[in-house]
Image (spheres, rainbow, N blue to C red):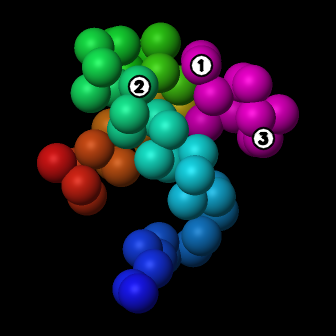
Amino acid sequence: MNKIRFERNRTHNYIVMYSLYLYFLGLRLRSTSKALVIFRDDKRSYVAVWNWIQIFG
């Protein structure tokens, strides 16, 4: 099975997939980035979420 790899791998794959899931459910970019606080990871900006959408969109 091929794993999805990111350039710097700064963010875990499950966080990226969760943010994409939230965005495609209808949340705005800023709301999606604020929802990632539950992972207690470094804060991700809405631009990072937008970049992930551009990769998988």
- The answer to whether residue 42 of the structure is visible from this angle is yes
Residue assigned mark 1: 35
Name the N-terminal-most of marks 1 and 2.
Answer: 2
Q: Secondary structure at mark 1?
A: helix
On the image, the x and y values in percent for residue 38 come to 75, 25
- The answer to whether residue 47 of the structure is visible from this angle is no
- Crowding near pointer 2: few (<14 within 10 Å), some, many (20+)? some
Name the N-terminal-most of marks 2 and 3.
Answer: 2
Name the N-terminal-most of marks 3 and 1.
Answer: 1
- Asked if labels 1 and 3 touch by Cβ distance under 8 angstroms, the answer is no
Q: Residue at x 72, y 24 (%)?
A: 37
Gap in angstroms between the C-alphas marked 1 and 2: 9 Å
Q: Is residue 56 above or below residue 15?
A: below
Kindly identify the amino acid type of the residue bearing the numbered disc 3.
Asp
Q: Secondary structure at mark 2?
A: helix
Kindly identify the amino acid type of the residue bearing the numbered disc 1.
Ala
Query: Within the image, what quadrant is residue 28 found in?
Result: top left
- Asked if labels 2 and 1 touch by Cβ distance under 8 angstroms, the answer is yes
Residue assigned mark 2: 22
Q: Nearer the viewer, mark 1 or mark 2?
A: 2
Would residue 2 be counted in the magenta stretch?
Answer: no
The residue at the far front in this view is: 1
Q: Residue at x 53, y 25 (%)?
A: 33
Residue assigned mark 3: 41
On the image, the x and y values in percent for residue 55 come to 25, 58
Give the extent of the magenta segment.
Answer: 34-44
Q: Is residue 44 above or below residue 3?
A: above
